[in-house]
Amino acid sequence: MGEKRLSKVTSSAYEKIRSHILHGTFAPGSQLKEEELAVLCGVSRTPVREALCRLESEMLVRRTRTQRSYVTDWSNAEIKEIFTLRGILEGHAAALAAEEMTDAELRKLRASNYELRKAIDRKPKPDVKSFLECNHQFHNIIIGASGSKRLKAIVFRLVEQPIVYRTALGYDRQSLETSHREHEELTMAIAKRDAEWARIIMSGHIRRAFHIYAENYIVDR
């Protein structure tokens, strides 16, 4: 198998395993066995092993001294820290975006939040999967508009966690609507080129998400 082909197979295995982790199919703390993953992905164990290494670098997988792989299981203290760091870093990204975002990016931001609104309004219940996709896109536009590759790389590691998916599962329609309104105010702050306003809204937005997560998953706060 050529190097290019191996890269494609590894990428495919990576995406499949990553999706299962993010969506909770592989629960936090569960063991990831290479032979079972190879069957699931329809590949040999080599690309699975390479995919697990990449997921380990993204902190989605942890490897023991005996080379067994497990889905990362965050402690309560680590979860609190993740949300705290997200608030600081994404708040900074929003402030930078308020100064740097182009008109084209601002249009994309508004369109993304419009689609997020449609996902919330779906009947008989909100479309959480579409909400997550739109929410991810919304935040990515802001981070991208910050102009900082370093910041983007750091935030990616914090945002691309099962915690984000589990947080959204704890949202009722009212919480989803509140998230949309915060996005609207954040978009307004960016459109007004008010960096400090954007920072405050984003930081509060992330902090509210923490409390929703805590209410559903953290007993001792």
Image (cartoon, grey):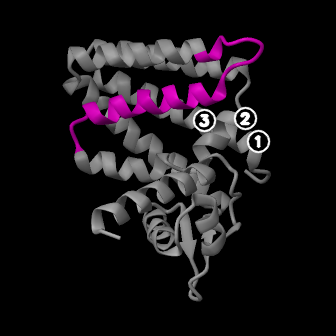
Where is residue 76 shown, x and y percent of the image?
Answer: 67, 58
Q: Is residue 115 above or below residue 67?
A: above
What residue is shown with label 1? 216
Q: Is mark 2 on a helix, strand or loop?
A: loop
Region in magenta: 119-148
Q: Which of 156 and 210 is in front in this view?
A: 156
Where is residue 149 shown, x and y percent of the image?
Answer: 24, 46
Q: Is mark 3 on a helix, strand or loop?
A: helix
- Separation of marks 1 and 3 at Cα, in angstroms: 11 Å
Mark 2: amino acid: Gly
Where is residue 1 shown, x and y percent of the image?
Answer: 35, 70
Residue 28 sits in quarter: bottom right
What residue is shown with label 3? 209
One can see residue 182 in this view: yes
Q: In this view, does 166 lie above or below 43?
A: above
First along the sequence among labels 3 and 2: 2
**Residue 72 part of the magenta-drawn span:** no
